């Protein structure tokens, strides 16, 4: 399975989970990823196997 790690600066919501600057989110087993920016944000998305 794939593991996706998202490290935002700003404020975002990822699949319903809130994340702020310097937070990280591990996402596994999802068919779709929904990202909503609450502020101006920068994201780093890594698709690691």
Image: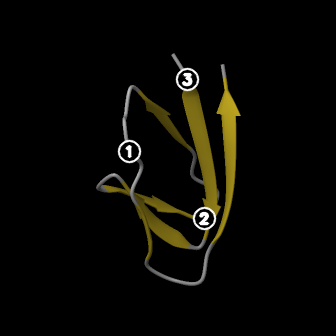
Task: Examine the rendered structure and indicate whether residue 32 appears above or below residue 1.
Answer: below
Identify the disc placed on residue 2.
3
Q: Nearer the viewer, residue 12 or 34?
A: 34
Task: Examine the rendered structure and indicate whether residue 39 appears above or below residue 26.
Answer: below
Residue in the image at 51% along x and 83% along y = 39
Badge 3: few (under 14), some or many (20 or more) residues near its Cα, within 10 Å?
few
**Residue at image mark 2:** 21
The mark closer to the camera, 2 or 3, is 3
> In the structure shown, which secondary structural element does the residue marked by tag 1 occupy?
loop
Give percent across and percent down for residue 48: 68, 26
Residue in the image at 61% along x and 75% along y = 41
Q: Does 38 sit left or right of 17 as displayed?
A: right
Closer to the N terminus: mark 3 or mark 1? 3
> In the structure shown, which secondary structural element does the residue marked by tag 2 occupy?
loop
Q: Does 9 sit left or right of 26 as displayed?
A: right
Verify CB contact (< 8 Å) between mark 2 and mark 3.
Answer: no
Give percent across and percent down for residue 3: 56, 27
Verify CB contact (< 8 Å) between mark 3 and mark 1.
Answer: no
Furthest residue in direction left, as rendered: 16
Residue in the image at 51% along x and 16% along y = 1
Closer to the N terminus: mark 2 or mark 3? 3
Badge 1: few (under 14), some or many (20 or more) residues near its Cα, within 10 Å?
few
Task: Examine the rendered structure and indicate whether residue 16 appears above or below residue 48.
Answer: below
> In the structure shown, which secondary structural element does the residue marked by tag 3 occupy?
loop
Identify the disc placed on residue 32.
1
Q: Nearer the viewer, residue 9 or 37?
A: 37
C-alpha span from label 2 to label 3: 24 Å
C-alpha span from label 1 to label 2: 23 Å
């Amino acid at each position: 399975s794939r593991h996706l790690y998202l490290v935002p600066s700003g404020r975002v919501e990822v699949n319903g989970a809130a994340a702020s600057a310097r937070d990280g989110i591990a996402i596994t087993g999802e068919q779709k990823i929904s990202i909503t920016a609450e502020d101006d944000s920068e994201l780093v998305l890594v698709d690691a196997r």
